[in-house]
Image (spheres, helix red, strand yellow):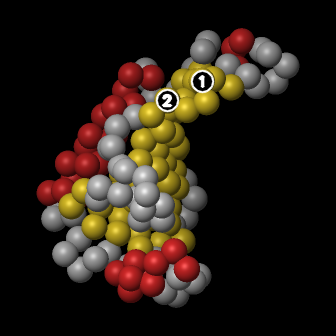
Amino acid sequence: MLPPAVHRKGNAEVSFTIPLAEFSDRDAFPARLSQHVERLGWRRRHWQFLNPTHALTFDWERSGGGVQIARNDPKRTVDFGKWRGEWDDAQGNVLEYHVWAFRVAKGPGHHLRVFAAYIPADLVKAGVNAEFR
């Protein structure tokens, strides 16, 4: 895990990796995450904060169809999917999570890569042109 970054304007990011015993275990993290933040009073957003023409589904999307790594070695072939969730609270702060799930075709290595960001309401109001650092 990288240490969280907290910027002078109050926004923050963190990223981390979660190993998976089975690729199908990927569904548990977004489900628990959603339940947790919604219990704390955060509401699901319908549209992406930085790309407001794109709807949020809170569901997995297949990405890339598979990637060949290192000279077509089938043991290193991965499939991956992505999940995105965004919430806001009554004050207008935004919380966003991006989750990528990687399935290694042969051998160990299934994992989730997670990126999370907190954007305070004043930066949300300033919009995509806000200076975040």
Coordinates of residue 92 in the picture (x, y in percent):
28, 77
**Residue 95 percent across, percent down from the top left:** 36, 64
As displayed, is residue 23 above or below residue 116? above
x then y, percent, for residue 75: 69, 14
Q: Which residue is mark 1?
A: 65
The answer, for residue 112, to whether it is visible in the render is no
> How far apart in space, not on screen, are marks 2 and 1 (Cα)?
7 Å
- The residue depicted at 61 percent of the width and 30 percent of the height is 64
The residue lying at 60 percent from left, 24 percent from top is: 65
Apparent side of residue 123 relative to residue 104 in the rendered image (left or right): left
25 left or right of 63?
A: left
Callout 1 amino acid = Gly
Does the residue at mark 2 contact the one at mark 1 (Cβ under 8 Å)?
A: yes
Specify few, some or many for label 2: CA neighbours under 10 Å numbering under 14, 14-19, or 20 or more: some
Query: Percent x, y for residue 10?
Result: 44, 83
Residue 53 visible, this orientation: yes
Which quadrant would the C terminus be assigned to in this image?
bottom right
Name the disc covering residue 56, or none: none
Q: Which residue is mark 2?
A: 62
**Mark 2: which secondary structure?**
strand
Compare residues 30 and 54 and report the one nearer the observer. Answer: 54
